[in-house]
Image: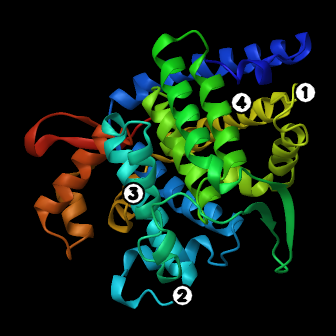
Amino acid sequence: MDNFINQLNFDFQTNQLVLKSISFIDSFKGKWNIVESKENIFLKELRKIATIESIGSSTRIEGAQLTNEEIKQLLENVKITELKSRDEQEVIGYYDVLEIIYENYENISISKNYIQQLHQSLLKYSTKDDRHRGVYKNLSNKVVANYPDGTQRVIFNTTEPHLVESEMNYLIEWTNDQLNLKSLHPLIVVGLFVYEFLSIHPFQDGNGRLSRLLTNLLLLKNNYLFIQYVSFENLIEQKKKTYYEALMDGQKDRNSEKERVDKWMLFFLQSLEALIHRLEQKYDVFKTKGGYLNERQKKIKEFITINQPIKLSDLVKSMPDFSINTLKKDLQYMKVEKIIDSVGKNKGTIYVLKDN
């Protein structure tokens, strides 16, 4: 049972590039998972930022128009009954599924039932999609690129409806077998799954968005935990032309002996490398700036910068609008996040900025 191995029969140079990427990604994965095990405010804030970017980019790739700032405001003030525009409906659907995946990825299996459930949740608020939500397509469809000026371009044709069930069953079984057997590296398996899912295009609508959600799910299930703190979707939006070209390169020989996914696999792996570099830069910025501070904590940091060393009593006098308990908690938080240091005990404790 392996119709896919031929697609992975790369030339020597491609194999070397694939191995190089995998080695880099796995090396970072090991280091990052140590960071992940020490929960801190940096990660919470990075995930919040990445979530907004992922929702915005993934829906815009498919033609939505909402900016990241508009999406942020929508999520902060969401009222499901007032989701009138299709863009808003798609944004909230994507947010819901992303959160389901982040919170439950260990318990979500790669199966027909779960994939269809995720599709149903993705289109939950979209009234236009009532009839085909959560079920495989019954009409032919195509992979289409949407451009900002409203034009579309057909990228390639997809599996005919009567073949979808059997092709999806085969893909799901192959993916689970390979991940269990570990005869192929999991990143290769994930990359091929995404290519095949997009080639089959099993649902009438929402395939592009669901493919990106399933990418996150599969990476998390294989312990690539960093993916929730940096947006793969955002990178694809920025490299949309290269993304479609990589898919088309394999698709031009679809269902023939010549079909190869080398261009796609390199795009997929090198995109993960680029995401790692982004995440390292973002994380370094957060550490350098002392993490995420609310407006009150920023004022405390500014006060310490100008007046250090300071005591709690100095802070209380300078910020009379806040209780001593609130300011105590702020100082404790800033110590935990390594923004400030303290010397002494009780009322004699003094606080200074931590040297970076």
Q: Are marks 1 and 3 in contact (CB under 8 Å)?
A: no
Q: Crowding near pointer 2: few (<14 within 10 Å), some, many (20+)?
A: few
Tell me the distance, in whole angstroms, between the alpha carbons under discs 2 and 1: 44 Å
Residue at 45% from the left image edge and 48% from the top image edge: 115
Tell me the distance, in whole angstroms, between the alpha carbons under discs 2 and 3: 34 Å
**Nearer to us in this view, 104 or 2:** 2
Q: Secondary structure at mark 4?
A: helix
Mark number displayed over residue 85: 2
Tell me the distance, in whole angstroms, between the alpha carbons under discs 1 and 3: 55 Å
Residue at 53% from the left image edge and 53% from the top image edge: 50
Amino acid type at circle 1 is Lys
Q: Position of residue 152 (x, y in %)?
A: 84, 72
Amino acid type at circle 2 is Ser
Reading the image, the residue beneath label 4 is 269
Residue at 8% from the left image edge and 41% from the top image edge: 346
Reading the image, the residue beneath label 1 is 258
Q: Quadrant of residue 303?
A: bottom left
Q: Residue furthest left?
A: 346
Tell me the distance, in whole angstroms, between the alpha carbons under discs 4 and 2: 35 Å
Reading the image, the residue beneath label 3 is 293
Which tag, 4 or 1, sits closer to the chain's start?
Answer: 1
Q: Are marks 2 and 1 in contact (CB under 8 Å)?
A: no
Q: Secondary structure at mark 1?
A: loop
Which tag, 4 or 2, sits closer to the chain's start?
Answer: 2
Where 253 falls versus 162 (above or below)?
above
Q: Secondary structure at mark 3?
A: loop
Q: Nearer the viewer, mark 2 or mark 3?
A: 2
Amino acid type at circle 3 is Leu
Q: Determine whether, in the image, residue 143 is placed left or right of residue 23.
A: right
Q: Crowding near pointer 1: few (<14 within 10 Å), some, many (20+)?
A: few
Q: Nearer the viewer, mark 4 or mark 1?
A: 1
